[in-house]
Amino acid sequence: MIASNKERIANIKALKQRFKILDPNKIPSWVSIEAAAIFEDELQWRLEINKDGEVCYKYNPKSESEASRTSLKYYACKYLCESLEMKYAWEKANAFFENNPNKGQLWFSKCLLNSLIDPNERIETNREIKSRKNAIIKHLEAVVSLTEEATGTLLQAWADENFQANKRISQGAYEYNMINKYPDRNLPTKTDRRNIRPFFPPFEIQVLIDSLKNSNPPRGIYGRQTNGEKAPRLLFIRSLTCALLQETGKPYRKVVVQAASTAFQCSLSTPEIIKATSSLNPSVEQKIVGGLDMWRIEELKVKDLLKNPELPFFLTPP
């Protein structure tokens, strides 16, 4: 046991040396180094330290929105990791999974990150999604009309080329599957590649139209307000609450109050959180925690975070 503790202390020291954006010495004892590493990993994809020792963008933002969202994510991560006001929330995370505080903290850190609006994310309300869906259907129906009026020569040439393109795509997917030895992935087999069906443009496009008409995107977590100064905070509150309800069955209002108040440097109350999340239905919302499978959270320890020298920490494709 003593040797194991010494090894962990050595691993933690090595891991802290790989922090560039966050200061590991400012992270309080109630935040595990593994949880802090998830924040650091996310930030290192977008930020770096310049020659003057200042935090700056790793890549030039393509828009003002991307720049402001990246800045928001940096400061929110910094506050969530370092603030003394988050003590209750991080300690509560230790109990999210029975007898597994490390898993609880890792899961919580990923929830916090995923609840912060992504710098490149496009946000749409349910009404906007429905409107876009109808617009796509309208354009596809116009394409069907055009293809039905086309000559047989054009349609046959189109069908032939599409058939060859599908064969190339299928072959590439099969070879990738074999090279990377992912037998559990649902990629084409040799038999699949021999059985690529013919393509008739008007019919295929009509299939797309019918499937789109029958599709029912899950209700979003965005609510009615997707723009404006308070929109990122509202998204954070609804997303984090939804994730907690999905995983634990409890809303943990006090945790959400502390996290949102800390991330956005404001003072929120429990009634405000309840009002912001009153329309949530976690049974039909999309799953919030993505990008880090639960089995990876189970296995993630400090030594695992030190294995890949090419990436900041551990977010390699499975």
Image (cartoon, rainbow, N blue to C red):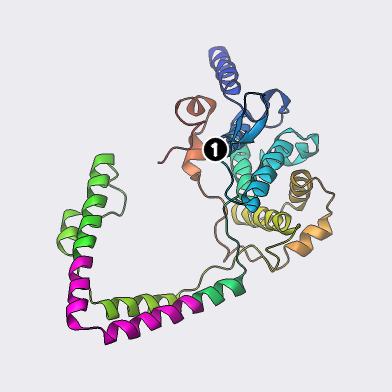
Say if the magenta span includes residue 144: yes
Q: Is residue 107 above or below residue 230?
A: above
Q: Percent from the top left, x then y, of residue 89?
A: 73, 42
Q: According to the image, label 1 marks what residue?
A: 45
Q: Quadrant of residue 88?
A: top right
Say if the magenta span includes residue 157: yes
Q: Nearer the viewer, residue 131 or 317?
A: 131
Query: In the picture, which quadrant includes the N terminus?
Result: top right
Compared across the picture, whether 265 is left or right of 207 comes to right
Q: Quadrant of residue 90?
A: top right
Q: Is residue 18 above or below residue 148?
A: above
Q: Nearer the viewer, residue 241 or 47?
A: 47
Residue drawn at 21 percent across, 83 percent down: 151
Compared across the picture, whether 129 is left or right of 316 comes to right
User: Which secondary structure, mark 1?
Assistant: helix
Query: In the picture, which quadrant includes the C terminus?
Result: top left
Q: Nearer the viewer, residue 24 or 287?
A: 24
Q: Is residue 13 visible?
A: yes
Residue drawn at 17 percent across, 69 percent down: 160
Residue drawn at 18 percent across, 58 percent down: 193
Q: Percent from the top left, x then y, of residue 52?
A: 67, 24
- The magenta-colored residue range is 134-162
Q: Amino acid at mark 1?
A: Trp
